[in-house]
Image: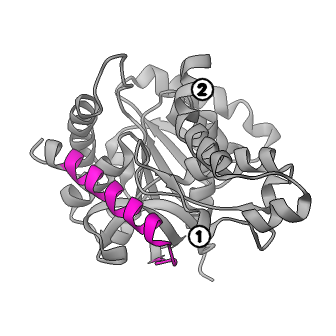
C-alpha cells in the first residue's frame, strides 16, 4: 500500500483542541513537519516551544508556528478553530458564528492549497464539513469531518464497562449527526464477533432495552458532562483525530465513522454526515452502506434532515 513519507500537517487553531492534537501527533511522530497556525501568533509559538522541548525524548520533527502560506503542499490540513457554545445559546446561533469563521478560514486556506485532505474538527462539525466542501469545490473524498469517531469511542468505552470486557473487543458505531440526533447502530455492534445480546447472555450479564437507552443517552451527553466538570473537552478529540491522521498518512484503509458528503448512500444526499467509511491516503476511499434495521435507517434519515435544516440556516453566510 502507498504511504506518505516526509508528510506535512497544518493545524488551524492553537486553542486547547488544536494544541492537544499537535501534542498527540508529535508524541506519535505521525508526520515530519507540523505547522500550527493561529491569529494569536504568540499562543501558537508558545505551544510550539512547549511541544518541541519534549521532542528529544520522542524523535525529530520540524514543528513551527506559521501562517496560511504554510498550507502549501500539506498532506492534511486540520481546522479546529471555533467559538465555544455559551449558556442559553441555540445550536443555530453557534452554527452561524462558527460557519462565518470557517468561511474565512477556508478562503485563506484555498489561497495556498495545492493538495491534501481537509479535516474539519470545528463544531457544528457536520454543517461545517458540508460548507467547506461547497466552498472549496474539492472532490468530496478530500473533505472529511471528525464527526462521530469520538462519539463511537465513547460508546465503546461505556459499553465495555457495562459488559465488563476489554474495550478493544468492543466494536460499534455512533451514526448520524455529531450532535443531538446521533444514535448507536446496535445491529452493527459486536463483542468479539458476537452480538451484544449474545455476549451478555453468554457472560451472564443482564442487558435490557433500558440499558441500551441509558448507554445511548450517556454517550450523547458525555461531551457536555466533561465540559461541566473541567470546562472543556480536548484530550479525547486529540486522540481521535490523531487516529484519523494515522489512517490517512499511513494509508491504512481503516473503517471509521466520519463525516463526508453523501450522494445517495442510504437514500440520503445533500448533506455531510457520519457513517462507516474507509479512509486512507486519498481521504474517503469508500462510504460503506452497512445493513441497518428499518428503525436505524429511519433514525439516520431523520438525522440527515436535522443537519439539512441547520445547513439551510447558514448556507448564505
| Picture disc at residue 226 | 2
3D distance between C-alphas at marks 2 and 1: 27 Å
Say if 114 sits above or below 236 in the image. Answer: below
Residue name at image x 52 percent, y 68 percent: 276
| Picture disc at residue 255 | 1
Say if 122 sits above or below 115 in the image. Answer: above
From the viewer's perspective, tell me whether residue 27 is left or right of residue 278. Answer: right
Residue name at image x 24 percent, y 39 percent: 99
Sooner in the amino-acid sequence: mark 2 or mark 1:
2
Rate crowding at label 1 as few (under 14), some (14 to 19) or many (20 or more) other CA atoms within 10 Å.
some
Q: Quadrant of residue 32?
A: bottom right
From the viewer's perspective, tell me whether residue 157 is left or right of residue 179. Answer: right
Say if 104 sits above or below 249 in the image. Answer: above
Residue name at image x 81 percent, y 51 percent: 206
Instruction: Measuring from the top left, give residue 40's x and y in whole percent.
Output: 39, 23
Q: Quadrant of residue 263?
A: bottom left
Q: Please say whether residue 264 is one of the residues in the magenta stretch.
A: no
From the viewer's perspective, tell me whether residue 179 is left or right of residue 154. Answer: left
Q: Which residues are magenta?
A: 287-311
Say if 86 sits above or below 311 in the image. Answer: above
Front tag of 2 and 1: 2
Element class at badge 2:
helix
Instruction: Measuring from the top left, give residue 281's x and y in whole percent.
Output: 52, 72
Amino acid at each position: 500500500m502507498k504511504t506518505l513519507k516526509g508528510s506535512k500537517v497544518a493545524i488551524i487553531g492553537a486553542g486547547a483542541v488544536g494544541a492537544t492534537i499537535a501534542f498527540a501527533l508529535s508524541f506519535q511522530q505521525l508526520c515530519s513537519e507540523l505547522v500550527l497556525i493561529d491569529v494569536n501568533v504568540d499562543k501558537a509559538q508558545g505551544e510550539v516551544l512547549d511541544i518541541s522541548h519534549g521532542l528529544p525524548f520522542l524523535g525529530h520533527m520540524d514543528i513551527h508556528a506559521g501562517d496560511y502560506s504554510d498550507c502549501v503542499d500539506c498532506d492534511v490540513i486540520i481546522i479546529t478553530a471555533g467559538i465555544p457554545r455559551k449558556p442559553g445559546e441555540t445550536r443555530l446561533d453557534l452554527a452561524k458564528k462558527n460557519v462565518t469563521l470557517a468561511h474565512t478560514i477556508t478562503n485563506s486556506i484555498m489561497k495556498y492549497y495545492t493538495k491534501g485532505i481537509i479535516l474539519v474538527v470545528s463544531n457544528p462539525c457536520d454543517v461545517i464539513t458540508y460548507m467547506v466542501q461547497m466552498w472549496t469545490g474539492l472532490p468530496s473524498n478530500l473533505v472529511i469531518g471528525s464527526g462521530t469517531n469520538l462519539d463511537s469511542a465513547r460508546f465503546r468505552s461505556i459499553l465495555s464497562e457495562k459488559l465488563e470486557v476489554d474495550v478493544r473487543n468492543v466494536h460499534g458505531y455512533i451514526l448520524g449527526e455529531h450532535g443531538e440526533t446521533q444514535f448507536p447502530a446496535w445491529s452493527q455492534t459486536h463483542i468479539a464477533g458476537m452480538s451484544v445480546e449474545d455476549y451478555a447472555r453468554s457472560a451472564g450479564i443482564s442487558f435490557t432495552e433500558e440499558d441500551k437507552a441509558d448507554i445511548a443517552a450517556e454517550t450523547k451527553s458525555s461531551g457536555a458532562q466533561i465540559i461541566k466538570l473541567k470546562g472543556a473537552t480536548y484530550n479525547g478529540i486529540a486522540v481521535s483525530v490523531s487516529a484519523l491522521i494515522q489512517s490517512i498518512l499511513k494509508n491504512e484503509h481503516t473503517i471509521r465513522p466520519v463525516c463526508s458528503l453523501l450522494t445517495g448512500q442510504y437514500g440520503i444526499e445533500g448533506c455531510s454526515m457520519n457513517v462507516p467509511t474507509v479512509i486512507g491516503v486519498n481521504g474517503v476511499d469508500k462510504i460503506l452502506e452497512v445493513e441497518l434495521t428499518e428503525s436505524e435507517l429511519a433514525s439516520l434519515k431523520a438525522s440527515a434532515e436535522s443537519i439539512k435544516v441547520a445547513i439551510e440556516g447558514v448556507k448564505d453566510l
